[in-house]
Amino acid sequence: TMPILEQCYNLMDFEHVARRVMKKTAWAYYSSGADDEITMRENHTAFHKIWFRPRILVDVENIDTSTTMLGSKTDMPFYVTATALGKLGNPEGEVLLTRGAKKHNVIQMIPTLASCSFDEIIDAAEDGQVQWLQLYVNKDREVTKRIVQHAEKRGCKGLFITVDAPQLGRREKDMRTKFQDVGSNVQSTGANDVDRSQGAARAISSFIDPSLSWKDIPWFQSITKMPIILKGVQRVEDVIKAVEAGVQGVVLSNHGGRQLDTAPSGVEVLAQVMPALRERGMQDKIEVFIDGGIRRASDIVKALCLGATGVGIGRPFLYAMSAYGLPGVDRAMQLLKDEMEMNMRLIGATKVSDLNTTLVDARSLSLH
Ligand code: FNR
């Protein structure tokens, strides 16, 4: 029998339940990583190499987990990252994530390849609720321009351009299920002639432009006033280039381990990026986010101590939504909030701006 919601005590519990109750194709699409899934596993285990250095005898009666990302206030330093095909896991799709985000006052990134239409996801939000757009850049730039300008008009507060997916990775678990049902699960792409023999991911991604390059960034800056963030940056040199290109942010991410296997985890790159930015006096020129493998608030706290502005969380909310619908999403976010308050109290930090490198020992993280 399926555990009741109250028996889920952490984000991993939702994954165990989802694995049992989800349709095979949906589970395969959500849970798969590229190739041998080494990067996917490393995303989470990298956090185990970071240890806290707690401060004692700090007055921690009141804890404030709120912060600001890209100029927008949020109650928690995590956001719901973009994940495609929400209706595979739950017939209501991404609007459930919107409602969960509303309840907890956290930010949601809307995926290009959502199952619900973009406008449905915008309409599900309350006035003042902050949403961002994740963009897969279409070969047809007029289509891209229309999507971006529509998002800006509808009030999106950030444009996250995915830069780690000029070709979709091989997610073999997904490919093996020979995805049959793409058409009814994705709305916003206009992808028609899809190759269904390659799994869900590859079937829906054929419109993505592999020729996208640094030269295109000024064009994006010319068509929108939204802050531009590159999602999927994986090395220090590219963060420096991003600063020089004048974009407002980067997400250090390997797409949840779904693209290049044995690419480094976001938190591992973060530990190299922040010192490099400080060395060049660039630390205030760009907001650095990470995603991948974040399952505990302690992971969030560690990322913030290392200099991240915020973190994205993907699969856990999909699993919560698939297993329990909105109450699942709600509980997953509440669990993170409770964990966050406890972690901050126990390391002696009362607010997000207290989180700094002296509170962690990340020496075992270094890739050098
Ligand atoms: C993703 N991710 C993703 N990223 C993106 O830019 N566009 C997309 O359409 C998708 N789709 C997608 C689907 C599914 C099922 C997953 C699991 C992931 C990547 C996502 O934004 C993020 O980088 C990872 O999910 C973060 O890792 P965790 O939290 O899932 O471990």
Image (cartoon, rainbow, N blue to C red):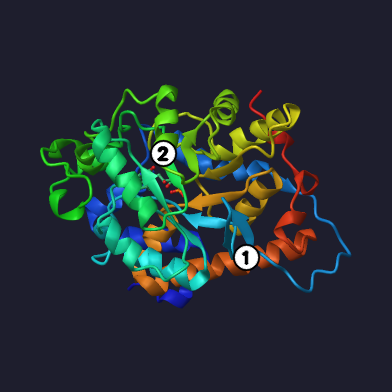
- Asked whether the viewer can see residue 37, the reply is no
Residue 278, image x and y in percent?
Answer: 73, 32
Q: Is residue 212 above or below residue 361?
A: above
At label 1, counting other C-alpha atoms closer than 10 Å, the crowd grade (few under 14, some 14-19, many 20 or more) is: some
Quarter occupied by the N terminus: bottom left
Quarter occupied by the C terminus: top right
Tally of numbered tags: 2
Q: Is residue 320 above or below residue 30?
A: below
At 46% from the left and 49% from the top, the residue drawn is 158
Seen in the image, is 194 located left or right of residue 240? left
The residue tagged 2 is: 161
The residue tagged 1 is: 339
At 32% from the left and 22% from the top, the residue drawn is 211
- Given residues 197 and 278, the one toward you in this image is 278
Residue 195, image x and y in percent?
Answer: 13, 36
Q: Amino acid at mark 1?
A: Glu
Q: Is residue 245 above or below residue 91?
A: above
Seen in the image, is 248 located left or right of residue 5? right
Q: Secondary structure at mark 1?
A: helix
Residue 41, image x and y in percent?
Answer: 48, 41
Which is in the foreground here, disc 2 or disc 1?
2
